[in-house]
Image: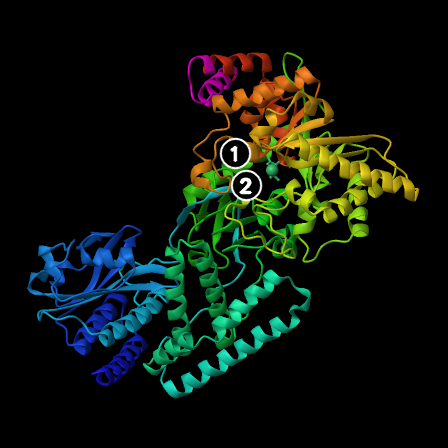
Amino acid sequence: MAERFETESRKLLGRLRDTLAEDSAGQARLDRIVTLIADSMQAEVCSIYLFRDSETLELCATQGLQAEAVHQTRLRLGEGLVGRTAKTRTVVNTANAPAEKGFRYMPETGEERFSSFCGVPIQRLGDALGVLVVQSKAERQFTPDEVYALEVVAMVIAEMTELGAFVGEGAALSALHQQPVMFRGAIGQEGAVEGQVFLHEPRVVVTNPISDDPDSELKRLREAVETLRGSVDDMLMRTDTVSTEQREVLDAYRMFANSRSWMRRMESDVENGLSAEAAVEKEQSLARTRMNGATDAYLRDRLHDLDDLSNRLLRILTGQGRDTGAEMPDNPVLIARNIGPGELLEYGKKLRGIVLEEGSVGSHAAIVARAWAIPLVIHAGGITTEALNGDPILVDGDQGIVHLRPDDTVTAAFRDKIAMQARAQERYASIRDLPAEDKAGNVVGLHMNAGLMADLPSLPTSGAEGVGLFRTELQFLIRNQMPKRAELSALYARVMDAAEGRRVAFRTLDIGSDKVLPYMKPNDEPNPAMGWRAIRVGLDKPGVLRMQLQALLRAANGRPLTIMFPFIAQYDEFRAARAEFDKAIAREKILGHPLPDKIEVGAMLETPSLAFAPNAFFKEVDFLSIGGNDLKQFFFAADRENERVRRRYDTLNVSFLSFLEQIVERCRATGTPVSFCGEDAGRPVEALCLAAIGLRTLSMRPASVGPVKHLIRRVNLNEAREVIHAARDAGEQSVRKSITEWLAKQG
Ligand code: PEP
Ligand code: MG
């Protein structure tokens, strides 16, 4: 039986290829295909359902059901057995369909006569396109070989859909890659841009899903896999300089590249008539489907490895490199699944915007994009599959929305928004040298956050008074080996030179949580955000901290120096860190190096515990800087990297503002200077409220200095404070509504 079927399936593929070669119109071609399959499978019915939109499937062709039902019968995702196949993306194979749970009878199709049902998802690279169904009167289950043949055919159909091979009037996916699509992602970096798509990794285009000659295809497949194995071995050979972590990834690659079952499955697909490329892609599709459903992070990572390996194999087979010769458009908007900071730095500032399928707000790429003020949208699910090089695209970083191939009305509205922003920029430039002074004469100090050399030109142009937070870890993250002391010292000296005497608060290394150094042994922790990070690492393994402190002292070379320690959760940690600094100063003194003429040592308040530290702590620190990103995450117990929970809690929540107000009060009582340097400081309404409750030094991304200053100069902070208190007394959960209404009244 199996043998009979294999030859049947090969024959079927051959006939499909002939159909593909004909130049019949879309619908006619679909009709030919279902007839062919029903015939070869000896089933009375074969139908193709395609997605009309992400929730609706439409019967697009049938052999055996009522012809009038074509393009009329529609099902929701999950509805009936067809909907279930699409939703679960697994084969549904049953001898008695009407007896199945969830069976939905559609009278217009006349399907009540059929008993057995087999539905196979049609998908390409993990994207569901539709469902291929066969049904027969006889009450029988389709054999594993039959199901296998259907899967192979579904794969070919998916390719055809992708190629627009049966694009026809009314066919569900006729407009794939042509229609406007909107993606709702998350904000990575604000700003609005219009540009053209530039794919970080262009998709490999498979144009020949069916082979003429399985033997020569097998040879091609085996040769390509050999080349792939060789290249992975080469990478491993060159790994004496790479970290254990990279090595582990490469080992996983090698394991996959040598996997017998992977090879066997691809070989059997080729033996059954698929081309080598299509066989690789079929495996890749399967891995992507599993990846979408995998909840275990480790498993997802490994499936990701397999996906990457499949891409490499496809490139070997098709000869298409990463560089497909596609020219970078004038206004490139980079589209990628994810990207590392190193790769992003290679593209440089020529990018107009960035859209990622994955990524997170705190990711290194996001930090680099922010430093360059390049609008960034993350979590734009499916964009790498939808976008083609050169497609027009609008990136709305303020709302986390992307319009791909937008229609004219959307583009016009978007251009208005860009023009408005440009006018606002001019307004901000005009107040650049004025203080952020409100109508009552309260002055707010506005500083900027930085971390890369590329940030520093923004210091004079933004109007910031200094650098309130210099994230030193960025310099560690963009390298692939631990920087040397002399290198760091030269870099910090350049930062101080560029600041031209303005204060720069250097935060010592804040690694751990999502900031993992590629060259440090990975730490397997159940909850890294609350794990061994920042000062905890610095104190337990003080080598790097000491080196960094020494580099900072040498960079200052007699000039004033400001440092702060991240993530101090209790008094002792500050004392221990400060003791390290004192030791470093003493060593420098012995060596006869010049010492800074003024030293400030602060702590970052990022855990609620520190707000309740003894008065002695408040008196001992030279200043406190509130790291609102972490503080808010721990205050609400809501992961800052998890958009779903992060968004639940407003920064303007009265509990959080009251908590901040208590910190301000303690600082006032103990005479401790305090500032706020989380991302919220850069959002005008939030900044206004922070200033109103008494936080009179704020540090933010450079592009926010203008808008924040503009707003502060137009209001009375004393009044804003009253509005906040009134909202709190009235029992409101967040002061946002009251403050927004009050602002509207101010005009
Ligand atoms: C913070 O937590 O608010 C902060 C400024 O530090 P980071 O965002 O680098 O953790
Ligand atoms: Mg922090």
Magenta span of residues: 728-746
> Horizontal and vertical percent for residue 93?
20, 66
Query: Which residue is label 1 attached to?
Result: 634
- Relative horizontal placement of residue 707, taking residue 161 as reference (left or right): right
Q: Residue furthest right?
A: 592
Q: For the residue labelled by badge 2, is the local secondary structure a helix, a strand or a loop?
A: helix
Q: For the residue labelled by badge 1, is the local secondary structure a helix, a strand or a loop?
A: helix
Asked if the residue at tag 1 contacts the one at tag 2, i.e. Cβ–Cβ closer than 8 Å, the answer is yes
User: Within 10 angstroms of label 2, few (less than 14), some, or many (20 or more) residues?
Assistant: few
Query: Which residue is label 2 attached to?
Result: 530
Query: Main SS of the magenta segment?
Result: helix
Rendered position, 190 above or below 445: below
Ligand 2 placement by image quarter: top right
Q: Is mark 2 within 8 Å of ligand 2?
A: no
Q: Amino acid at mark 2?
A: Met
Who is closer to the viewer here, 132 or 609? 609
> Horizontal and vertical percent for residue 604?
65, 32
- Relative horizontal placement of residue 683, taking residue 277 as reference (left or right): right
- Residue 669 on the magenta span: no
